């Protein structure tokens, strides 16, 4: 393991510890803190301090040491965990996190407000010294850490440990912080001939150690140096088995030197058969006898259920699977053309397998949304305190899985929505009381799967959206015309307009982060949608609907003339034949479908494709959110696994096309952006509407004008 | 003529190859070696190994070796790691 990897390990471990620390601190505010939690808090800072020491991060060591002192006082019950202390500890957490982030990015460690925090720690510590010890809560008297236990250690560092930038002495220094080194002796087995290499390690250390630690903790101390090293760690009671393992290691000179050390300590290697039970059980706990390097930390390998894989490896695997899907489709096509039954059968089996590989590969990228949710308790606490509102956050569905790349991109929009809910949604305590609601506001974060997509809801029990105010504002800003009549959903969607803000609600938190228009843009980039449900006086719900993955979709293949298009299958509701007898002059028609008016879009016309439409045409009914539309195409080809290839930057401005893919035949097919098409239709319709209305105004007596404004009648004839 | 070698403040793996070569040359001259250790403020296992190597080599060649004025940094390090062999050599140096 080189230093870089060791550093990565350190950063990863510290991040986990910090996360744990934050969770505990936030939990503890709500409930009474348990001795286990106090122990965990202390250990988090302590472990970071120790590891930071290994890397010579003196500032960090100094800082975490002070934080550790504070936590020590807390653990001993000399300080109560009140809001102030927990605030300081959260600041410590933030500071260490910022420093580690800078370290990971390769920047110099920022001083930040470290000095300030240290000062407040110092005041707290002084305060606690002044406190009478009689105030100790009884819980503090219970020892949290395991009782002091005695250990025997034989440390054979690998020959390359020095070259890798690690000094065995640092490990011993760290060990000394965990407990007491009762005896230590080194033996140095130098080569007899002239082959002394000044950069190679020849030292081996034997220790008797006493401390409140577990075998895992001791082993983890040396995990950084596990490469080529062998560390035998046993409880003092298992002396016989320890020596049995430790003494035969290395060459004769080393064996003699080590035996001399143990003899000098009065711990002779003669077997002690009096306690076979202890030795057998202890062997389980200790590292196995003279094994290879991999054997030196078996506990870790058995414990870990996860393998860390570089994200780029997964990406390239998914790329490859995408190519496999395309190639599979190609061979399937060939087999069909060939007509060979056995070939067809084998390609069918292959297609099934490819389908399985595809879903398995994609599922590897899936991570629970809880990772993103876990940051919100802190956010809600901070924002709530800042605004003086008492907020309770309820998280459900944290286990819902979502593509990793999406989880990362969701963090910002969700943060904004949650902040919005607290700032604008939830009213002040007085207002809530007046409305007959409990003082404590609620914010819900919920996630669940629904028909091939993931739905994430951010809900609050606040005042809800004020429709009249939104309308007034939108008219004032000229976003909508003064006489436009909008549905409830349309009104709600106005809040996503760029620069839209209902000014009366502005607080010092507004203007931070991204605006709601950016939220919608971010979600749309993920091929998702945002819906709003709101009831005045009772709260509102922002509902994000996202596809499960970004890489491969189930598509529906359609043909218009000689061009092939793909409609995402999840948006297809049904297909039907286009009724004959419709006039084809206007670009837009409507169809009556089971009592509903369905606007039609003639794709041939829309895309300006050459050629004449065939005699029989089909309508694909698509849905985006609550609106439906019919896309008129020539032929339907059915389902097709579609690997999405993004369009080049040249085509970025295209609105109706969301991407492209390669068909089995090698042809390129464009993927239709259904929400954009439907939006285009509604826009056209409303323009058409207002145009005809203005035309119709001077002639109120002619109802014909109004009816011809739409071709609805022609639709109804079917 | 005794060979007097003064070690600089930092004695770590960075200086180790150069130090070892210097000492190897000194051993070839077959004179008594005096190692001045008062300046050393930082030391690591690599440097300590070289000192042990020097002690054993000089014993093999029957060359007198004196480790003079070990700095607190060296003493602390040696007792931290329980380097008895070196501790003895330093102890002699202290008495002399």
Image (spheres, coloured by chain):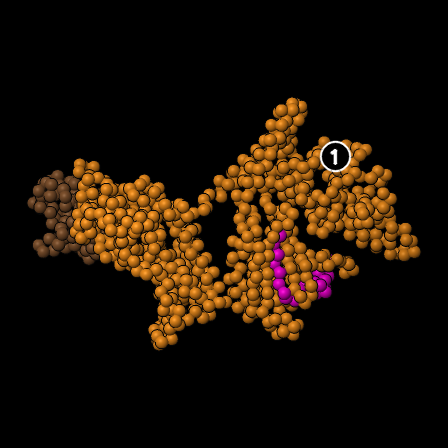
Chain colours: A orange, B brown
Image coords of residue B17 (percent x, y): 23, 42
Q: Quadrant of residue B31?
A: top left
Q: Is residue B83 visible?
A: no
Q: Is residue A700 visible?
A: yes
Is residue A699 depicted above or below A582 in this figure? below
Q: Residue A40: name its quadrant.
A: bottom left
Decide if residue A244 is on the left or right side of residue A356. Answer: left
The N terminus of chain A, quarter of image: top left
Q: Residue sitting at 67 percent across and 57 percent down?
A: A532
Judged left or right of residue A40, residue A535 is right
For the record, the magenta segment spans A455-480
Q: Position of residue A56 (x, y in %)?
A: 32, 54
Chain of the residue under label 1? A
Q: Position of residue A710 (x, y in %)?
A: 84, 48
Q: Which residue is mark 1?
A: A635
User: In the rendered view, does A334 fall on the left or right side of A125?
Assistant: right
Q: Residue at x 48, y 40 (%)?
A: A313
Quadrant showing the C terminus of chain A: top right
Label 1 residue SS: strand
């Amino acid at each position: 393991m080189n230093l870089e990897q060791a550093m990565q390990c350190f950063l990863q471990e510290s991040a986990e510890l910090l996360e744990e620390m934050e969770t505990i601190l936030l939990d503890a505010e709500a409930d009474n803190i348990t001795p286990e939690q106090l122990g965990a808090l202390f250990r988090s800072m302590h472990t970071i301090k120790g590891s930071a020491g290994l890397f010579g991060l003196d500032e960090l060591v100094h800082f975490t040491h002070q934080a550790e002192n504070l936590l020590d006082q807390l653990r001993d019950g000399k300080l109560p965990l009140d809001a102030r202390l927990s605030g300081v500890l959260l600041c410590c957490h933030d500071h260490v996190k910022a420093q580690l982030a800078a370290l990971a990015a390769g920047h110099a460690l920022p001083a930040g407000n470290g000095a300030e925090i240290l000062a407040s720690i110092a005041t707290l510590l002084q305060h606690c010294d002044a406190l009478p010890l009689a105030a100790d809560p009884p819980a503090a008297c219970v020892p949290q850490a395991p009782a002091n236990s005695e250990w025997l250690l034989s440390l054979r560092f690998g020959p390359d440990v020095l070259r890798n930038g690690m000094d065995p002495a640092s490990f011993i220094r760290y060990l000394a912080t965990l407990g007491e080194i009762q005896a230590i002796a080194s033996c140095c087995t130098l080569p007899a001939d002239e082959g002394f290499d000044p950069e190679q390690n020849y030292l081996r250390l034997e220790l008797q150690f006493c401390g409140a630690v577990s075998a895992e903790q001791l082993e983890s101390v040396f995990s950084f140096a596990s490469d080529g090293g062998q560390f035998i760690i046993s409880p003092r009671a298992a002396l016989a088995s320890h020596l049995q393992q430790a003494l035969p290691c290395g060459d004769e000179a080393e064996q003699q030197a080590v035996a001399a050390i143990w003899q000098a300590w009065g711990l002779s290697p003669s077997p002690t058969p009096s306690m076979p039970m202890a030795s057998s059980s202890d062997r389980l706990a200790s590292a196995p006898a003279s094994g290879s390097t991999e054997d030196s930390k078996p506990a870790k390998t058995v414990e870990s259920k996860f393998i860390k894989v570089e994200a780029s490896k997964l990406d390239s695997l998914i790329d490859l699977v995408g190519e496999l899907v395309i190639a599979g489709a190609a061979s399937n096509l060939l087999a069909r053309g060939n007509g060979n039954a056995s070939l067809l059968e084998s390609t069918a089996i292959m297609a099934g397998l490819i389908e399985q590989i595809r879903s398995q590969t994609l599922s590897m990228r899936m991570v629970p949304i809880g990772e993103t949710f876990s940051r919100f308790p802190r956010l809600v606490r901070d924002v709530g305190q800042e605004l003086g509102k008492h907020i309770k956050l309820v998280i459900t569905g944290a286990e819902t899985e979502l593509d990793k790349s999406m989880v990362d991109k969701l963090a910002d929009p969700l943060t904004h929505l949650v902040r919005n809910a607290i700032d604008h949604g939830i009213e002040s305590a007085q207002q809530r009381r007046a409305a007959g609601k409990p003082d404590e506001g609620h914010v819900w974060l919920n996630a669940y799967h629904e028909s091939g997509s993931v739905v994430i809801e951010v809900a609050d029990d606040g005042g809800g959206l004020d429709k009249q105010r939104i309308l007034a504002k939108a008219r004032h800003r000229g976003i909508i015309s003064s006489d436009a009549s909008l549905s409830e959903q349309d009104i709600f969607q106005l809040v996503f307009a760029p620069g839209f803000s209902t000014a009366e609600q502005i607080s010092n938190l507004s203007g931070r982060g991204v605006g709601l228009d950016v939220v919608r843009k971010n979600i749309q980039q993920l091929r998702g949608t945002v819906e709003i449900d709101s009831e005045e006086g009772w709260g509102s719900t922002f509902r994000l609907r996202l596809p499960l993955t970004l890489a491969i979709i189930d598509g529906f293949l359609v043909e218009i003339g000689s061009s092939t298009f793909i409609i995402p299958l999840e948006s297809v509701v049904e297909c039907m034949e286009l009724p004959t007898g419709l006039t084809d002059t206007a670009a837009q028609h409507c169809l009556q479908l089971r009592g509903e008016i369905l606007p039609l879009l003639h794709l041939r016309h829309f895309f300006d494709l050459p050629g004449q439409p065939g005699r029989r045409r089909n309508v694909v009914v698509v849905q985006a959110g609550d609106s439906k539309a019919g896309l008129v195409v020539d032929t339907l080809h059915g389902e097709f696994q579609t690997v999405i290839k993004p369009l080049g930057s040249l085509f970025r401005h295209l609105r109706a096309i969301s991407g492209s893919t390669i068909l089995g035949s090698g042809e390129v097919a464009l993927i239709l952006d259904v929400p954009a098409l439907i939006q285009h239709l509604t826009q056209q319709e409303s323009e058409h509407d207002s145009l005809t209305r203005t035309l119709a105004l001077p002639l109120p007596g002619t109802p014909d004008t109004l009816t011809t404004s739409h071709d609805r009648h022609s639709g109804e004839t079917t | 003529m005794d060979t007097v070698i003064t070690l600089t403040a930092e004695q770590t793996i960075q200086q180790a190859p150069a130090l070892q070569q210097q000492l190897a040359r000194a051993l070839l001259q077959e004179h008594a070696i005096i190692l001045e250790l008062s300046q050393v403020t930082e030391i690591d296992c690599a440097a300590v190994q070289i000192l042990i190597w020097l002690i054993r080599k000089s014993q093999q060649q029957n060359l007198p070796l004196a480790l003079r004025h070990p700095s607190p940094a060296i003493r602390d390090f040696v007792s931290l790691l329980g380097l008895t062999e070196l501790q003895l050599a330093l102890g002699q140096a202290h008495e002399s």
